[in-house]
Amino acid sequence: MATDELVKTTGIAQHGASRLPSVDVDSFNIEIKDDNGFLGDRASKGAFRDILDHWRKPLRKTGEDPFGKVPTEEINKKTLDAILVGDDTEASAVVHSAIEDFAQELAYVTRRFLKTKAWAKTERIVVGGGFRDSRLGELVIARAEIILKSDDFKIDLQPIRHHPDEAGLIGALHLAPSWIFEAHDSILAVDIGGTNIRCGLVETGWKKTKDLSKAKVVHSELWRHADDEPTREAAVKRLTKMLKGLITEADNEGYKLAPFIGIACPGVINPDGSIEKGAQNLPGNWESSKFNLPASLIEAIPVIGEHDTAILMHNDGVVQGLSEVPFMQDVGRWGVLTIGTGLGNARFTNRRRENGNGKDRDSTENGKKKGKADKE
């Protein structure tokens, strides 16, 4: 389907837009390389597993590995969290060693982002992704912030507020124009990942507060597509079924569902809804010029209620970050890093009017302390 037709069908904006209702998206999905490859690979779930395995090796040689013969990749976050507060001091020491090394890696990667033009003057960074959903992840984030501040970076690093599984759904609200919320109290949201596809019915909370800070996921459905290894067409069919189920759920419970679906998807999203790159972990070829997810869903769900369906799709890191919009109004420029299979990233600038001049807020007190950047 052609770009003009798609934009007309969505009726509100282009997919992957840099200008959203509350923020400008300064950058997303940046791929920075160093001598060892892509920078994001140093701060991924796999990287942490490699570090943990590194600290287990010397203990394996002496037969004193507190984890025994369990492969590192089979040790989940819940087990590691329990070890941190348990009585096995040696196991706890191994995990703490991995936390310290991984925090150093996260701080290094964050430092590199902050030195790019797109991330200049960033004041705060929220960290999301599945890794954040653990005590382990919270300790890594807190330690990385301390490391950065010790290196004179004036930056706040904090865990994303909503559960990562819900942040990618709640953030979809901030893709939609505000007029949608005046006559409706909920939307449909989709969060597509390399392992799971999650759909949700998101209540806006618009009547309680206009900044959407009271938004919540009232129903959600998860499909672990990686277990089924479906074709692309089968995945779209299953996604459509999930969305139709939520439409029925909303109707049965008396929600005033907006004719809008917000989608978070890995990769670089083109204005017409096609995916340029970064979707290699999804089932089938989602980067094909012959495939367009929003167009496929519009065809399958042409109306919601009495109105034509509108769909907007953006990068998953962007959408997860957007869930923080209501809580970022005390800063001007902020970013998100999502630790998962890779490292998702996005940088935002809030748009606000001050003194009636219509210009974005500017701050000279963010980013790195004056003079330090010139030395490196």
Image (cartoon, rainbow, N blue to C red):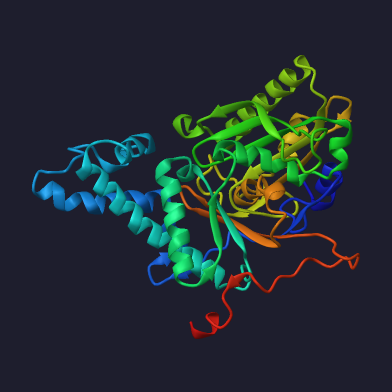
Residue furthest toward the right?
356
Query: Picture coordinates of residue 196 (x, y %)?
Result: 52, 35
- Quick one: 59 or 154, which is closer to the camera? 154
- 60 above or below 111? above
Image quadrant in which you'd find residue 76: top left
Residue at x-position 68% and y-position 53%? 328
Q: Going 80% across and 51% down the picture, which residue do you hit?
A: 21
Q: Is residue 174 visible?
A: yes
Residue farthest toward the left in the current orientation of the protein: 62
Task: Please provide percent x and percent y for residue 206.
Answer: 80, 35
Q: Quadrant of residue 248?
A: top right
Instruction: Out of 68 and 248, give the one closest to the viewer.
Output: 68
Q: In this image, 56 relative to 35: left or right?
A: left
Left or right: residue 262 versus residue 258 is: left
The residue lying at 60 percent from left, 70 percent from top is 367
Q: Residue at x 37, y 53 (%)?
A: 47
